[in-house]
DNA sequence: CTGTGTGAATCAATTCACAGCT
DNA sequence: AGCTGTGAATTGATTCACACAG
């Protein structure tokens, strides 16, 4: 019931998936969704779906299931997806450029509002319709219009420095694509996407032929 | 000691990080590494480091710590990083192109040997020094030289079809960048990197100001 | 005295089982 | 009948505590 604190991390990760697959089901015209269907679509179990949702309230109708549109709206509100997030990308190499133009962002309320780099050869150029700005101007830019999330797509060695700059500028959520363990103050949240570690995980599994159900998660 | 099966997933994820930070320490000339140092570098606890390693054997010297080079070599062997992995990238849009040229791959034994797409406008073009091939030729290409890992960088709606093609061609490990839950036979392992879910996770946290230690993992 | 290796205890998450509503 | 919501039981992972080695 309607508690809001201390939600376990795996639960939040699954909520993201419920929300996405609900949206898809709604587009397909589905009106009622039982936990079994939601579970099958997201790789969870029906009990998990129900318990996850029960952290926030009782959204279903016994004997029937969940109203797809209503549940989607509840999830959208719960996850803060009803408000647009101002996102910046720091580091405009291959990965950063690709992220800046990633179509799944804008369509889900994550608005890429600025790109930053420290390389003079890149500053001032247009990438994905945005002008690359000097990382040195981040702090003052944020004073004018604050940034919700910074995506770090910089080389391994620069990641900690860049994180410090972003945190000093007031950004409280970072998505880090460098294979670096960032040190940040406790009021800042970091999520990391480490492509190399993912390949290494697969390598371990290939080396051990560990048959185990495939792990699928958001980063 | 020296068991090889049923290693918990979080352990493998941490092993990747131990290996990486050991390599870095070795480059800096460090010879002996206590579990405390390894833990501080990777965001784990010293007990975790020791227990994780104890799944595979006793590599340390009591009262001293671990020999950096020896432990790195042991980890490299355990994770199968001593053998080169043949990797392909399917989907050569912005994300796929960036991944094909990601410098962290080649340098760690992940050799990108081919790129595939289904878009005739892209097939035959050079991307990151490789010619883009027709996805339809994947199966026969794999018969000549098998592929260890396929990276899927295709749109959401195509991901399952492409996964099926890769699996049919004999690929047993997939790294999926589409926000889709792939259905694969049990002998195939899927890891997913979902950038949208990561942003949504951050959005949840911003909406709830859930103070909780930052989560950093290889997506 | 420092630091590893490891069983025991704690903490967290998943799964079970079932009461209650439609 | 079918399905949700939820305490209870179970499984799994982390942390503790300490014997042992240099």
Image (tube, coloured by chain):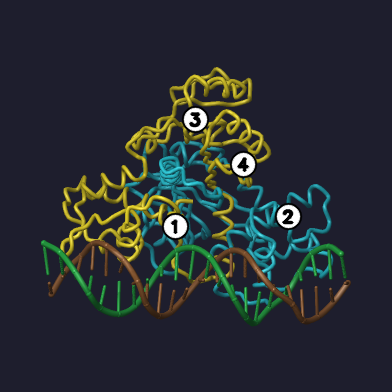
Chain colours: A cyan, B yellow, C brown, D green
Q: What is the x, y in percent for residue A197? A: 41, 46
Dot 4 alpha-carbon crowd within 10 angstroms: few under 14, some 14 to 19, many 20 or more: some
Q: Residue at x 56, y 50 (%)?
A: A213
Dot 1 alpha-carbon crowd within 10 angstroms: few under 14, some 14 to 19, many 20 or more: few
Image quarter in which the N terminus of chain B is found = bottom left
Q: Say yes or no: labels 2 and 4 on the same chain.
A: no
Secondary element under disc 1, as helix, strand or loop, is helix
Determine the secondary structure under disc 2.
helix
Mark pair 3, 1: CA separation: 26 Å
Label placed on residue A22: 2
Q: CA distance from mark 1 to mark 4?
A: 22 Å
Question: Do circles 1 and 4 both sit on a common chain?
Answer: yes
Mark whose residue sits in front, 2 or 1: 1
Residue C4, quarter of the rendered image: bottom left
Q: Chain of mark 2?
A: A
Work out whether residue A133 can be spotted.
Answer: no
Determine the CA span between mark 2 and mark 4: 22 Å
Q: Earlier in the sequence, mark 4 or mark 3?
A: 3
| Residue wearing tag 1 | B10
Q: Which residue is mark 3?
A: B88
């Amino acid at each position: 019931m309607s508690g809001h604190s201390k939600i376990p991390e795996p639960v939040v990760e699954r909520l993201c998936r419920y929300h996405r697959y609900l949206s898809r089901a709604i587009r397909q015209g589905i009106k009622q969704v039982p936990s079994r269907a939601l579970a099958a679509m997201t790789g969870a179990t029906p009990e998990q779906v129900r318990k996850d949702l029960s952290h926030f309230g009782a959204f279903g109708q016994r004997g029937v299931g969940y109203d797809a549109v209503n549940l989607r709206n509840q999830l959208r509100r719960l996850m803060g997806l009803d408000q647009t997030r101002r996102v910046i990308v720091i580091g405009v190499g291959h990965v950063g450029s690709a992220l800046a133009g990633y179509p799944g962002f804008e369509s889900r309320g994550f608005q890429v509002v600025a790109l930053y780099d420290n390389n003079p050869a890149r500053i001032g150029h247009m990438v994905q319709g945005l002008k690359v700005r000097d990382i040195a101007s981040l702090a003052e830019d944020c004073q004018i219009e604050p940034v919700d999330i910074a995506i770090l797509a910089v080389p391994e060695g620069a990641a900690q420095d860049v994180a410090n700059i972003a945190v000093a500028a007031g950004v409280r959520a970072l998505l880090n694509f460098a294979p670096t363990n960032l040190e940040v103050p406790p009021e800042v949240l970091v999520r990391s996407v480490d492509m190399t570690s993912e390949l290494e995980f697969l390598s371990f599994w290939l080396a051990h032929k560990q048959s185990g159900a495939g792990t699928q998660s958001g980063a």
